[in-house]
Image (cartoon, rainbow, N blue to C red):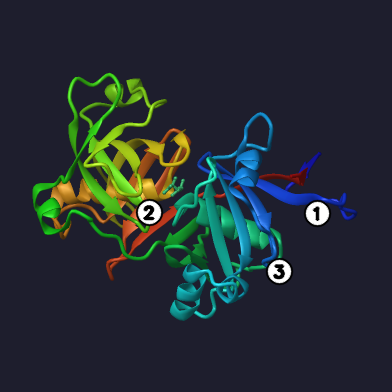
Amino acid sequence: MTQPATSPVPSVPTPGTLAFTKGHGTQNDFVLIADPEGLLDLTPADVRRLADRRAGIGGDGVIRLAPTAALARAGEEAAQVALAQDPTAEWFMDYRNSDGSVAEMCGNGVRVFAAFAEQEGLADLSAGPLSLGTRAGVKRVTKEANGWYAVDMGRWFLPGGESAAADGYDAAVAVRGWTAPRPALSVNLGNPHTVVALASVEELASLELFHAPEVAPVPPHGTNVELVVPLGEEEGPDGVVGRLRMRVHERGVGETPSCGTGACAAALAVRTWQGGSSGDGAPDTWIVEVPGGEVRVRVLPGGDVELAGPAELVYSGRVSL
Ligand SMILES: N[C@@H](CCC[C@H](N)C(=O)O)C(=O)O
């Protein structure tokens, strides 16, 4: 049973059913659940069922919106950290991958979460930015004049440290069909990423990403793998903009049409390859083309990274678990 996202969910809910909204950011799609009292115990099996494209609603991930304070009281450490960082972070994004696993962060998810909070009457981005808690700290979302949502994703780092920044790689990735693994750079956005550069868009288009790429050394908590082709630079309204194309294999999901933290990791890796650890000489702003559209990644003057792009709510309904 579905209704347009602009209509309220049926006013007389069937007992035992759960209200949901389906949304996406550049086709990275999510099942969104509002849990304003913080009472919902969403098990990994529930998440797999909701995300199932045949037996459920379908999505790359499931996002629960819950009160940060209630989660903090219940002992969720990330919620306690978020409130200590920013007491105005009233709502928390509890993000799960479609296989039921918990992930620290989801860049596209934060934008869609903001749109969902607006729909539910829990936030008003026309009045100012929204700060929300995540397992990777507080993220601040601003709505742009064109309707895009811009997220201050905070700090990022190269887990391989100084030598990775200097050498440009600290890992190797093997994709099915390649004769040998290729050098790669690990980038952490709160969640782990491994970025590999390819020479042509033709090779990128022909990759077999149904199977997970093999990464060495094996990352302790798994990783998302981004395959990127730098496409050069162009003149933007505020200076030089870099462009790149990307495909991604997400941890806990498989190939997806977009990944926001992945787009940031891809831009930061290419910037490192072009300008060294400081990125000096490489553009601060990047347009990242993904199969589901385009997002913008910017290194802000203070060193934070920003992700901007669209967020769409498609329909709402009720589902039984
Ligand atoms: N699609 C997301 C990332 C979701 C989490 C990821 N699969 C992980 O396990 O780290 C994004 O837009 O960032």
Query: Residue 9 or 65: which is nearer the viewer?
Result: 65
For residue 37, the mark is 3
Q: Which residue is mark 2?
A: 191
Few, some or many residues within 10 Å of mark 1 (<14, 14–19, 20+): few
**Residue located 45% across and 40% down the image:** 258
**Residue located 23% across and 31% down the image:** 198
Would the CB of label 2 be found within 8 Å of ligand 1? yes
What x and y, as percent, mark residue 22? 66, 45
Few, some or many residues within 10 Å of mark 2 (<14, 14–19, 20+): many
**Residue located 35% across and 23% down the image:** 205
Q: Earlier in the sequence, mark 1 or mark 3?
A: 1
For label 3, the SS is: loop
What x and y, as percent, mark residue 193? 32, 47
Q: Nearer the viewer, mark 2 or mark 1?
A: 2
Few, some or many residues within 10 Å of mark 3 (<14, 14–19, 20+): few
Q: From this viewpoint, is residue 139 visible?
A: yes
**Residue located 15% across and 45% down the image:** 169
For residue 8, the mark is 1
Q: Earlier in the sequence, mark 3 or mark 2?
A: 3
For label 2, the SS is: loop
For label 1, the SS is: loop
Q: From mark 1 to mark 3, how far is it between C-alphas?
A: 19 Å
Would the CB of label 3 be found within 8 Å of ligand 1? no
What x and y, as percent, mark residue 19? 76, 51
Q: Earlier in the sequence, mark 2 or mark 1?
A: 1
Q: From mark 3 to mark 2, how far is it between C-alphas?
A: 27 Å
